[in-house]
Image: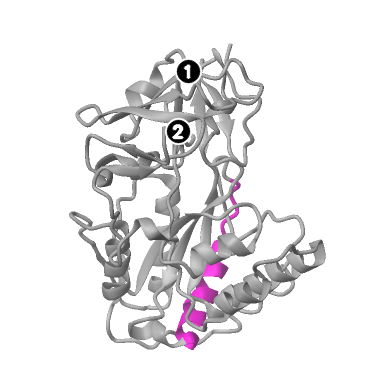
Amino acid sequence: DGIRDKLVTGVQTCALPILPYYGFFCKSDFDEYGRWKYDNQINSSGPYRLISFNKERNTISLEQRKDWPISENTNAPKLIHIRVDQQDSTLLKNHNPYTMVNGTFDEQTPLDPKWKLLKGAKIISWNVILNPSRGVFKHVKNRKIVAAQMKEAMGRIDKNFEWFAVSPRFYPFSAIINLASKNKTTGSKIFAEPLATKNPIKIIDIPRSNQRVKLVYSVLEQVFREQKIPFEYVSIDHKNKTDRQAKQASQDELDIYTIGVDKGGAAVTSVVHMMFCSKLGANFPDPSGRICKLVEEYQGRDLSPEETQKFGERFEEIVDDDACVIPFIHRGQNWLYSDDLDLSLISPNMSFPDLQLIKIK
């Protein structure tokens, strides 16, 4: 039960998927290429310890630590099995005891009515990136033309979606920030001119597997076809690539790609640093360098409500003005759970539940 746990298989195989539930990692755990340094160890801390990993069944088992103060929840589970796998429609159709299922559900998902639903706050965003490091989008003017046209097309979406929301702002649900009157790049009247390019815009090609993906691609296609801008879809082979290597391939080969990130409910310096200024984070581009300079200006101290609001406003303004990161889809982590579990202690703002707060009835 020391600082590090031994694993019977390589960390690359099983450790990273369970980190949200179990352990912690930091910059020193990775080498210069973004690969995990240790063959059979993972940083360990918290109320549960890893006891087994079944590679064939892709199942991880955690056991409650006997020497850990498990808060006041005496009904916390003693043993937890986590399976990292593709969403199983059979599992969703059949209610199972003592079970939680994390997934991307929508109106078309067939669910057993016995399942209960914990619907998370919309703190995860899926963002379209106009790549500022290559091609036509090296020039901010070109990015602003396409960004303005995309935002106008997004504004014409008049449907309210139950499982997600559409907004070109990073934090559309923040109570203290309102930039509706300050959005200076939206609208085709500002950038009525077409994007001048003879070469096709290279867009990342991903499966149109759900309503959210279809919506994003329909807007991209609508903008480019209306403006008679040539485009083509390009697939990136992720096989034998780390996440960092796949991101680098997108930056090297594509004009438009996407990044998803858990961004929280409002702009705070640590999260913005993770998204834009850290190699371990989402790796959003900061072509002007202004976002990381903003973080440096505000980080390392407690901010007053007024300073927090000012930071959030300036962050949104820079993102809007740089016009290379276009927030699009906002959703939450949704959990189905069986009726023999009590999740009353779990906040909907948690992306992953704190295991010691789960109660067994």
Region rendered in magenta: 140-160
Q: Position of residue 284 (x, y in %)?
A: 45, 68
Indicate the secondary structure of the residue bearing disc 1. loop
Q: Name the foreground residue: 311 vs 103.
A: 311
**Relative side of 183 to 262, left or right:** right
- Relative to 187, does residue 215 appear above or below in the rendering? above
Instruction: For residue 327, say whether it is visible.
Output: yes
State the residue position of label 1.
78
State the residue position of label 2.
102
- Relative to 39, does residue 47 appear above or below in the rendering? above
Instruction: Indicate the quadrant containing the C terminus: top left, top right, bottom left or bottom right.
Output: top right
Residue at 43% across, 46% down: 211
**Relative side of 297 to 251, left or right:** right
**Relative side of 167 to 139, left or right:** right
Q: Counting residues from the N terminus, which is met first, the one under dot 1 or under dot 2?
A: 1
The disc labelled 2 sits on which kind of residue? Answer: Asn
Residue at 51% across, 74% down: 147
**Relative side of 325 to 88, left or right:** right
Residue at 43% across, 69% down: 129
Q: Name the foreground residue: 244 vs 52.
A: 52
